[in-house]
Image (cartoon, rainbow, N blue to C red):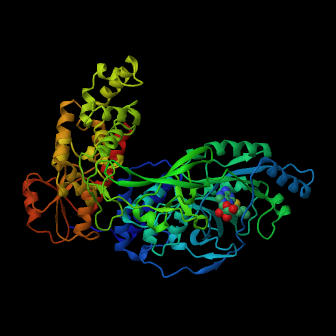
Amino acid sequence: MGESLSKNEAEERIQKLREKIFYHEKKYYVDNNPQISDYEFDLLIKELETLEKRFPELITPSSPTQRVGEQPIEGFRSVVHNTPMLSLDNCYSVEELFEFEERIKKLLPDQKIEYVAELKIDGLSISIIYKEGSYHQAVTRGDGVKGDDVTANVKTIRSIPLSVPAQKNIEVRGEVFLPFKSFKKINRERADQGEGLFANPRNAAAGSIRLLDPRLVAARNLDVFLYSLQIEGNESDSQWRNLQMLKEWGFKTNPQSCFCNNLDEAVFFWKKWSEKRDDLDYDVDGVVIKVNSVAQQKILGSTSKFPRWAISFKFPARQATTRIMDIRIQVGRTGALTPVAVLEPVKLSGTTISRSTLHNEDEIKRKDIRIFDHVLIERSGDVIPKVVAVMKKRRTGEEKKFIFPSRCPVCGSETFKPEGEAVSRCTNPSCPAKLRESILHFASRRAMNIEGLGEALVDQLLDIKMVKSIPDLFSLTKNELENLERMGAKSAQNLLDEIEGAKTREFYRLIFALGIRYVGERTAEILASSFQNIDALSQAGIEELTQIPDIGPKVAESVVFFFKQPENKALINCLKKAGLNLKTSTEEKRIAKIFAGKTFVLTGRLESLTRDEAGDLIKKGGGTVSSSVSGNTSYVIAGASPGSKLRKAQSLGITVLNEKDFFDLMEKSSVAGDEEEGS
Ligand code: IVH
């Protein structure tokens, strides 16, 4: 039993796995076009890890398992760049941009000049060296001449290839950045933990790349766009060609980059993106316009600070100074008390800003923010504006320290701040503020999507007590609604139709709409695919929940806590009576995992996995591990020196697998899953 691979077979399989993994990493992280589920991807990694553990001599530094180093380092070594990493000259108007072209034309008389326009990513620049095609070293820009060796940290960025097809020495340069989504997540976690917040994604990216432990860096979800390529002993002919080469070799390049026949086309590109930059999921602060021809770039050369062949045409600033006129407390859906600064209205890249979140009590203390302070605020993308700095020099003595309330400002109940957390919460389960926010969340687009049920209407319904709980929404009548402010017969009917429509939304949306702490959309989907209906979900215990892949103890505890509360039990009963869809559809079941409903028993010593590891794989796949063989057992996995369990399995006619069969089964099941998804 326990059939094991020979070293040659293992080597072959390892090779195949690495190719597959690199292929899928590129599809996912570079092309934004995943071909398999995260789960199937994890299985490939796990199998490779297992084989490499058994044959450590086959591990190479560019194996996909080697992205994240095990040990924190003590500090960063300083490394001198092959060629200095210059910065860019800036301009802020079309006139200035044409002056840049005038300067160029003097040095290139009568030549046609073509350009490449690229978004200027607001991150930090990095140089990465590949030796004979393999990832070798990554260095920050530093002072331009020398930077910090961040090889281990940059290696954790999954969109960076660990090898390139050409077996050459190359240097690529680009911008490491943090997508807004990851930035918000990091700050949310830091706010929860009472840690200082990053003012913007750039600072967060810079802070992340300088962490000493690559395992922490890996969790930050940094990303990178490459824009420069140098091949040793090879002259490239143009920037546009370089971008194509980078792409062909598997590097992530910015998809918006644009070839321009002349400067007018570059201006057009700048105008377009100065209006659309909020649509991007990363921060950009301008457009870099580069002379395309490398021959022309050479003639133009550089000053000591920047190249004469490129310029950055900045977008309007997203920072402004203003004054804090008041600090108010908002109470959220979970009862969290969030301080909000009321600002003297100020224009910031096209929008008027009059509020800014101050996150929590600690953040106010840390920055020593006072009412009437002059402050620098910053907005990036769709992120809520933040106070970046207090201008203490402008203080007159009139400023007032803010005293954080010890009671809920809406209902007057006591607040509670758990040990180690930074956020105080209102303890009253029926606090009107919680109800208001819960209804708004319930009706929101990604939850039950009840169009027309916005803030103003919810406030009215609550004020006149027409709605005292979420289920009350489902017994509203046309008569009642018609009499509300700004509501006619037609809009009343539209709203009723919308509310009716909410009854047939998918089950996962309802789970999300309930507003259970830590249950976002994705977790709601997992829960919906793991439980048939609301009763099964509400009766699940911590153990059952944590058996589900991707559900950790924090989520499990929160789910159990939610369904234990009498008011939530009552809520579910009312939603049932109102006729909402509270069960999983076949569509939702489809994403259930490959071992769902299957029970495994392990016996004997396995070659390449410990029993725990095998158990993890089974649980990740949605299966259950049992300690004894019975009629309910689906498979017995038998290793060396199996016990009586094997005999029992044989006598009951239960399928017995060796290790290799088990891996085959995983592979087959996930392929079958693929086909199902395609059909
Ligand atoms: S080219 C010699 N292209 O902007 C040319 N830079 O202010 C050097 N940046 O240090 C840079 N996006 O960190 C270039 N598409 C882009 C860029 C870009 C962002 C950053 C880079 C550089 C800084 C210069």
Left or right of 217 in this view: 667: left
Q: Residue furthest front?
A: 398
Rendering quarter of residue 78: bottom right
**Percent x, y for residue 240?**
72, 52
- In this orientation, which residue lies closer to the viewer: 264 or 59? 264
Left or right of 223 in this view: 611: left
- In this orientation, which residue lies closer to the viewer: 6 or 526? 526
Rendering quarter of residue 290: bottom right
- In this orientation, which residue lies closer to the viewer: 270 or 136? 270
Rendering quarter of residue 138: bottom right
Q: Quadrant of the N terminus?
A: bottom left
**Percent x, y for residue 79?**
63, 79
Q: Quadrant of the C terminus?
A: top left
Q: Is residue 552 visible?
A: no
Q: Is residue 481 above or below residue 405?
A: above
Q: Residue furthest top?
A: 489
Q: Quadrant of ligand 1?
A: bottom right
Q: Is residue 671 above or below residue 51?
A: above
Query: How many numbered callouts?
Result: 0
Residue at image coords 32%, 34%: 463
**Percent x, y for residue 38?**
38, 53
Q: Is residue 342 visible?
A: yes
Residue at image coords 28%, 38%: 507
**Percent x, y for residue 293?**
79, 55
